[in-house]
Structures are given as C-alpha cells and as structure tokens.
Amino acid sequence: MEVMKKTVVALTWTMKDSLGELLDQLDEPIEFYVGGDDLLPSIEQALLGKRAGDGVQLYLEPEHGFGDYDEQLVFLESRALFQQGLEEGMVIESSALPKGARSQIGRDLLLTVTEIYPEHVVLDGNHPLAGIALQLDMKIRKVRPSTPEEQRRRSAGVGFFRTIPEGPAGPTTVH
C-alpha cells in the first residue's frame, strides 16, 4: 500500500542538525495520520507515494520544519506566581498558567521553563527545534488504512510532528 491521504504510516528516523549532531533517534516505529495534523507538510509531501520499506531523506530549513525562532514567544513572569516544584525544562500549557500571568501569552502555546531566577521565570513558547535546520533520515515501516476515529481526529494520536492550526493565539505553532 502506498502512503496517501487518510492512511497511517509507521516511521522510524534519525534526526540531525545541519552540522550532523544527533538530535533524535527513533528505533521503534511510531504511527502518523497522513492528511491531518500529525505531520509537517514538508514531511507529509515527501512521504506521499512511498511504500513500506522505502527510505526518505530530507533536509529542512527552519521555515519548513519547526519555524524560525521568535523572540516574541519568550516571556518573563514573576516567580511568585508559580509553585515551589517548578523546574527548568518543565512544559506548561499556556491555558494552565497561574492567575496573574500575562494576558498576551496565547492560549494555544506550550511553554518551556528555560530559566528560573529568584524574582522571575523565563518561559519559551518556541518549539525546542525552532530555528534549527534539520536532516531527517526516515524509514517507512508500515502503511495501513486509517480508522474512522483517526479520520475524525485527524491524528493517529502522536504529537511529535503535530501541527496546531492558526487560532486566536496567533500564527501556527508546531509541537
């Protein structure tokens, strides 16, 4: 079966930055819904027409991957707003921010706690791979028809390459 819209593709991959530094390696296949919200458009396009066993190599500039790094998505918040268990690297949904956090933070962002100071916390709404050119070496392990539930959700339930359409929070964000 070929990869086409409304199929589910199981992938493994190696992801490196433009200098060849390993960023991620997936040895166990993960399934993605094709034609929905699971895959970046550039990845989906490269997979169309391929079959199980095929390999796909891509080089993605930031604008075709996780976007350019946007300084406007970095926020400083008062440390007093947050509980004691806050740690660098934690991810917080913007809709779950404590009362008193800035209203200009979009409600559809995932924010990473990047720095904690005595008086403030730095929250970054950029994807961790934003601004990075990527080398992807993918292997298609399986292709199958999607279920009605996957079609309804537009997802096989995986979010690594998931795209969130533009909404009231602003431009498309990728998680």
Image (tube, rainbow, N blue to C red):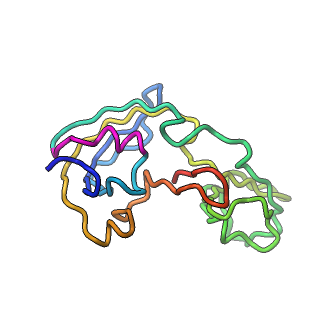
* Residue at 61% across, 59% down: 167
> Which image quarter: residue 78?
bottom right
* Residue at 62% across, 62% down: 108
Note whether 99 is above or below 75 in the view shown: below
User: x, y percentage for residue 161?
Assistant: 43, 51
Tell me, yes or no, whether the highlighted magenta stretch contains residue 49.
Answer: yes
Q: Is residue 162 left or right of residue 26?
A: right
* Residue at 27% across, 49% down: 11
> Which image quarter: residue 68?
top right
> Which image quarter: residue 96?
bottom right
Tell me, yes or no, whether the highlighted magenta stretch contains residue 43.
Answer: yes
User: x, y percentage for residue 126?
Assistant: 62, 48
* Residue at 47% across, 25% down: 19
Give the magenta-colored segment's residue range.
Answer: 41-52
Judged from this view, the residue extending furthest toward the top is 19
User: x, y percentage for residue 5?
Assistant: 29, 52
Judged from this view, the residue extending furthest toward the right is 119
Q: Could you say which is closer to the camera, residue 55 or residue 35?
A: 35
Q: Is residue 77 left or right of residue 52?
A: right
Q: Could you say which is closer to the camera, residue 5 or residue 156?
A: 5
User: x, y percentage for residue 17?
Assistant: 47, 32
Total number of numbered discs in the rendering: 0
